[in-house]
Amino acid sequence: MLLSNVQPLNPVAFEIFGWPIYWYGVIIILGALLGYVLANREAIRRGLPKDFFADLLIWAVPVALIFARMYYVIFNLDYYLENPGQIIAIWEGGLAIHGGLVGGVLTGYVFAKIRGYSFWKVADIAAPSILLGQAIGRWGNFINQEAHGGEVSRQFLENLMLPDWIINQMFIDGSYYHPTFLYESIWSFIGVGILLYLRRVNMRRGELFLTYVIWYSFGRFFIEGLRTDSLMIFDLLRAAQVISIVLIVGGVITIIYRRKTGLSRIRYLSDDPPKKKNKKKNRKKNKNKK
């Protein structure tokens, strides 16, 4: 194949009244929608209201996007101070998953508390959906030709038995690169399958979500080592690798702590214990019957 014939995919999916709609945004929205469908079905099965995750997404999605962008901007602060108009240009890429997770988890925690439900129950239900959204969202990086690894040969990519349309998209500025977006997407899809299986195992409450945190962080640590666009801490450490280690250690410690203190005695498939208010009402009803 002549290298001159290798052309990148058009980042614009379509236009509405002259406004370009980018594949990056379309793919992220698709991941969020499919994640919602998966979570909503399980939420209803586990006794949550039908509109619980719909209402949660109204708040969680914009907050997660803001946090994801803030995280990315902070680690590229010099550039964005010189180009402040680019801060809102999220259609060009530049959303950090770790920042989005922080925003999404914080929103989920507050929302669950306000609605009177266990955060860990909600987090366990959402865990496979979050990872599914990440697996799909990485293809937005593919379209934008970003989040790739170091230089490789075309033969290397062909040996991975990748289709030409993926190989050609990895041809950037005259060279081929590691499709690290694909490695992470595959790792995440495998993780979704594992989490869906673990639902049946009836794990302790909170451990499904913590397993997601550990699984994703473990894979991200090694994949991040291949990337050429890593966000750095003091130009010495890759931020994503540092955070991945913190999340793995934190996840393991949290599991151990919750088990030792009895906080995880409720199982995933167990019903929530009756609330105190309900108990008082039941007592009044019984007295009236007598």
Image: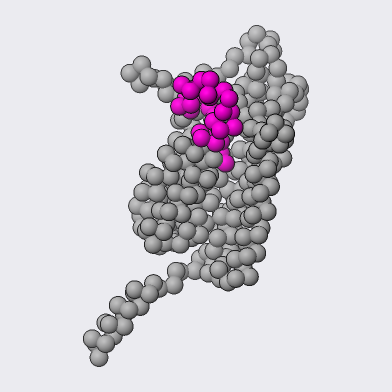
Q: Nearer the viewer, residue 199 or 210?
A: 210
Left or right of 271 on screen, residue 52: left
Which quarter of the figure has residue 183?
top right
Q: Is residue 79 magenta?
A: yes
For the question of whether residue 85 can be seen, the reply is yes
For the question of whether residue 197 can be seen, the reply is no
Q: Is residue 284 magenta?
A: no
**Residue 12: % across, % down:** 47, 20
Q: Nearer the viewer, residue 147 or 140?
A: 147
Look at the magenta stretch and give its main secondary structure. helix
**Residue 150: % across, % down:** 72, 26
Left or right of 17 on screen, residue 179: right
Left or right of 35 on screen, residue 238: right
Q: How is the image coloured?
A: one colour
Residue interval drawn in magenta: 69-98
**Residue 38: % across, % down:** 47, 49
Query: 118 above or below 66?
Result: below
Query: 127 above or below 236?
Result: below
Q: Residue at 68% of width from left, 33% of height from top?
A: 234
Q: Residue at 56% of width from left, 28% of height from top?
A: 77
Which quarter of the figure has residue 209?
bottom right
Tell me the quadrant of the picture where the C terminus can be found.
Answer: bottom left
